[in-house]
Amino acid sequence: MRLGIVRGHVVLNKAVPELAGTRLLLVDPLTAASLAAADGQGGGTPLVVADHLAPHVGQTIAFVEGREAANPYWPARAPVDAYCSLLVDRVDFRPPAQDAPLPRGQVSR
């Protein structure tokens, strides 16, 4: 699951029947750097996210990608790569300290 900011909506001229009633959002993913800056800017590569929650432009959302994105359409099959799974009320981002020990099992890169 990742966080992103809704930048707009996608309108299709013709859609597959499985996506009837689904809104498509243009989302700018948030990176650790953009969360630390707290400037409302994204930083990742924008992507299209399927949605049934109706967030407004500028709102922060969480979205899932891959096979899990099609789960809301089960048992039908839908050509979805990303799905808006929740609306974010607020984000409390605290970057880890540079000299803090890593959690057990993790190695530094």
Image (cartoon, rainbow, N blue to C red):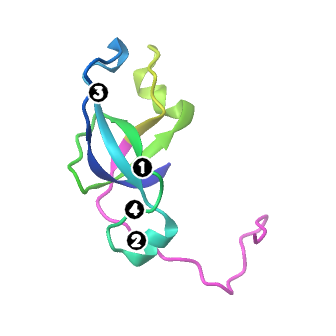
Helix, strand or loop at label 3? It is: loop
Nearest to viewer (mark 2 / mark 1):
1
- Residue 92, numbered label: 2
- Residue 42, numbered label: 4
- Which range is magenta? 85-109
Residue 94 x %, y %: 48, 76
Q: CA distance from mark 4 to mark 3?
A: 24 Å
Horizontal side of residue 87 vs 54, given as left or right = right
Q: Are circles 1 and 4 on residues that touch, CB within 8 Å?
A: yes
Labels 4 and 3: the sequence-earlier one? 3
Q: Are circles 3 and 2 on residues that touch, CB within 8 Å?
A: no
Q: Are circles 2 and 4 on residues that touch, CB within 8 Å?
A: no
Horizontal side of residue 65 vs 60, given as left or right = right
- Residue 22, numbered label: 3
- Residue 46, numbered label: 1
Quadrant location of residue 11?
top left
Q: CA distance from mark 2 to mark 4?
A: 16 Å
Q: CA distance from mark 1 to mark 4?
A: 9 Å
Say which amino acid is labelled 1: Pro
Nearest to viewer (mark 4 / mark 3):
4
Categorize mark 3 by other alpha carbons within 10 Å: few (<14), some (14-19), many (20+): some
Q: Nearer the viewer, residue 14 or 77?
A: 14
Say which amino acid is labelled 3: Thr
- Residue 62's place in the image compared with 85, above or below, is below
Labels 3 and 2: the sequence-earlier one? 3
